[in-house]
Image (tube, rainbow, N blue to C red):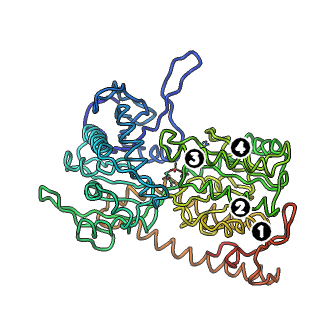
Amino acid sequence: MTDEPHQYDLVIAANRLPVDRVVEDDGTSSWGRSPGGLVTAMDSVMQGRRGAWVGWAGEVGEVGEVGEVGEALEPFTEGTMYLRPVPLSSEEVRDYYEGFSNDTLWPIYHDVIVQASFHREWWRSYERVNRRFAEAIAEVAAPEATVWVHDYQLQLVPRMVRELRPDVRIGWFDHIPFPPVELFAQLPWRRAVLEGLLGADFLGFQRVADAQNFVRACRQLLRAPTKNDTVAVTAPDGSTHTARASAIPISIDFQGLDALARTPEVRARAAELRAQLGNPDVLMLGVDRLDYTKGIRHRLKAYEELLRDKAIAPPEVTFVQVATPSRERVDSYRELRTQVERTVGRINGEFAPIGSPAVYYQHRSYPRDEMAALFLAADVMLVTPLRDGMNLVAKEYVTCRHDLGGALVLSEFAGAYHELHQAFVCNPHDIEGLKQTILKAIHTPARDKARIMRALRRRVADHDVNRWAERFLDALAAAPHRPERQERQDRLDQESRLERQEGEDRQDRQDRLLRRDPPDERVRLTQPQRSVHQPSSHDHEGRPSGPRR
Ligand code: ADQ
């Protein structure tokens, strides 16, 4: 492939290119593909097409005049994909990326868990970088190509591309939540953002509520005519089109990860990890980017209280928290790191005997096989975000549990909850409820947990990342109409859900009769206990456990 313009019929645009620079021992460096579901999915949809990916390579240009960018990296080919780097200056990394994307948009789109910062120079940088992306896309896209733009860093790109290349079909996918209009309205540049997005023919969101929030924002803030999931758009030049917004939840490469977790090496490593941790009865695990949206502090608070209540104790119960370094130059992230590390120190200082930490804290990244081993080793996976677009960790955990072991504690504020609602569901703001849910995840009988795990795995296997990508591209091709395949599939999904529900209800009734569970038993914390205690089959809201919700 060469870098001749206008020849790629599928163009992906995302803030980052799917590659990382790999530095060898002798100091030479090359580009290696970064692992991840998105890349796998894009690989599969690019089969038989000429595909290009436009994004920042993570290299920072020289400090200089605003707008001056470092030496542009030459385009290159990786596997089947043509990669077109978009250069950023260090000021742009600061203003467009760390500033506007991560300190203005990120907080607003995540329920303002921390205060958003508004700076006009950040906005100008965001506009400028979005234009650079749009120009690069317009340059590589073939006539009538499909352009798929990803995420909140590139919300102005759809309209800019439309103006430059009215012949192409434009889709945008939102990896994070789209906020309710009351929060979105705080953004001083709210109109420009909505107008930017409305350059797309189709907009995909993680949840139905996100798509609805977007359509409502268009109606209320732009006074745009809307009908169900569509918005009628009139551009400044008088041209019109209809944009459609719908939920298409992202997923992971189920087959690939499942196969990895079944390898003898990963199984052996999982056993080795447990042994290194002192073979606890219960190993709890948290895996997150170190981000205030992930609810790490709430999780630690609940865990600390359980230790104080003597409901659990090391070495029988222990907790590994893996926190990937993230956005370390943004103040709120630095503060979070300090708070988390202080709390971990306090918990270990107060509750852990010498040689048996209550929390193992790992502030680093791991390769995929090590992550798979950790997932396979963990009895209870704590996914407790305060707000999360999807949360792939929840899906990765159940994918690795081919042994049907383990229990997933999942926040109802993660997009994943809408697909994995059979998990041990919690509201992370309710510390008492979170404690109860953790205990319930520990104590539910293995047979019931296996049944839940089977249902969760089935969902992820049926809705993997390839299916997500296909659904998105189908929806984009058919927009503003619903694709036929989607309508048919929705009908099938609903039928099989109803059938499954009936079967599970029957099974649950039988189980209850056999066990004669009292209908409203709660896990009690009042009796001090050394470690693991009596199982209960009901969660903190008194609902029966199992795949019913
Ligand atoms: P993120 O907020 O980055 O993504 P998430 O969905 O949890 O979050 O994905 C994180 C990924 O990083 C997972 O694949 C996980 O395994 C990996 N990871 C985490 N810690 C790691 C470590 N220490 N070492 C190695 N790998 C690690 C955004 C949105 C999410 C949405 C995704 C995809 O915020 O809500 O699910 O995009 O759309």
N-term-proximal mark, 1 vs 3: 3
Question: Given contact means CB atoms under 8 Å apart, are the residues at marks 1 and 2 in contact?
Answer: yes
Which residue of the protein is positioned furthest toward the right in this rendering? 530
Question: Given contact means CB atoms under 8 Å apart, are the residues at marks 4 and 2 in contact?
Answer: no
Question: Given contact means CB atoms under 8 Å apart, are the residues at marks 1 and 3 in contact?
Answer: no
Asked if ligand 1 lies within 8 A of label 4, the reply is no
Query: What's the distance in space between the residues labelled 4 and 2, CA to CA?
Result: 21 Å
For the point 43% across and 52% down, the residue is 106
- Return the residue at label 3: 290
Question: Given contact means CB atoms under 8 Å apart, are the residues at marks 1 and 4 in contact?
Answer: no
Q: How many marks?
A: 4
N-term-proximal mark, 1 vs 2: 2
Dot 2: element: strand
Question: Given contact means CB atoms under 8 Å apart, are the residues at marks 3 and 4 in contact?
Answer: no
Which residue of the protein is positioned furthest toward the left in this rendering? 238
Q: Identity of the amino acid at label 3? A: Leu
- Return the residue at label 1: 444
Badge 2: residue crowd in 10 Å (few <14, some 14–19, many ≥20): many
Q: Identity of the amino acid at label 1? A: Thr
N-term-proximal mark, 1 vs 4: 4
Vertical placement of 186 versus 38: above or below?
below
Query: What's the distance in space between the residues labelled 3 and 2, CA to CA?
Result: 22 Å
Q: Position of residue 84 (x, y in %)?
A: 35, 34
Q: Position of residue 422 (x, y in %)?
A: 63, 69
Residues 357 and 261: in front is 357
- Return the residue at label 2: 407
Image quadrant containing the C terminus = bottom right
Which numbered circle lies on residue 263? 4
Q: Position of residue 77 (x, y in %)?
A: 40, 30
Dot 3: element: loop
